Image (cartoon, rainbow, N blue to C red):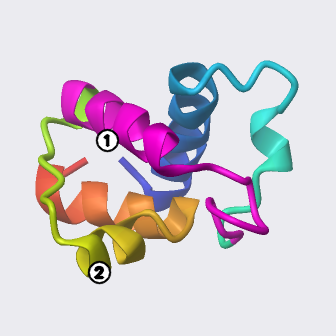
Amino acid sequence: MSTEALVTELKGIIIEALALEDIDPEEIEPDAALFGEGLGLDSIDALELAMALEDKYGVEIGEDPDENQAIFASVNSLARFVSERSGA
């Protein structure tokens, strides 16, 4: 799967897993922050998203907060993580 296709798919997963009904995938910038000033996600959202990624791609997200902060920094960073760990 191309990186662009994976990014598009991840945007859909974010919206579906977190029930973000009033956001379209095109509105999510691939390099924008997912937490804080960006999309405004919180730690509960991260857990929901981690479970969705594990279900869809079979990737396991550890408990290292620094590593997780890097993984969940943006859609592009999620795409890199999923691509490296799942072969997607």
Label 2, on which residue? 66
* Residue at x-position 78% and y-position 68%: 37
- At x 40%, y 32%, the residue is 48
- Say which residue appears at 41% left-offset and 59% top-offset: 79
Check disc 2 and give the amino acid type.
Asp
Marks 2 and 1 sit apart, C-alpha to C-alpha, by: 15 Å
Depth check, mark 2 against mark 1: the one in front is 2
Report the residue marked by disc 1.
50
Which portion, as a residue range, is magenta? 32-55
Please name whichever residue, 69 or 28, is drawn nearer the observer in this view of the structure.
69
| Label pair 2/1, CB-CB below 8 angstroms | no
What residue is shown at x 29% (from left), y 80% (from top)? 66
- Where is residue 25? Give x, y as percent: 75, 37
Secondary structure of the residue carrying numbered label 1 = helix
Is 51 magenta? The answer is: yes
Give the mark nearer the N terminus: 2 vs 1: 1
Q: Is residue 4 left or right of residue 32?
A: left
Q: Position of residue 17 (x, y in %)?
A: 50, 24
The image shows residue 73, relative to residue 4, as above or below, that is below
Would residue 57 appear left or right of 3 to someone viewing this image? left
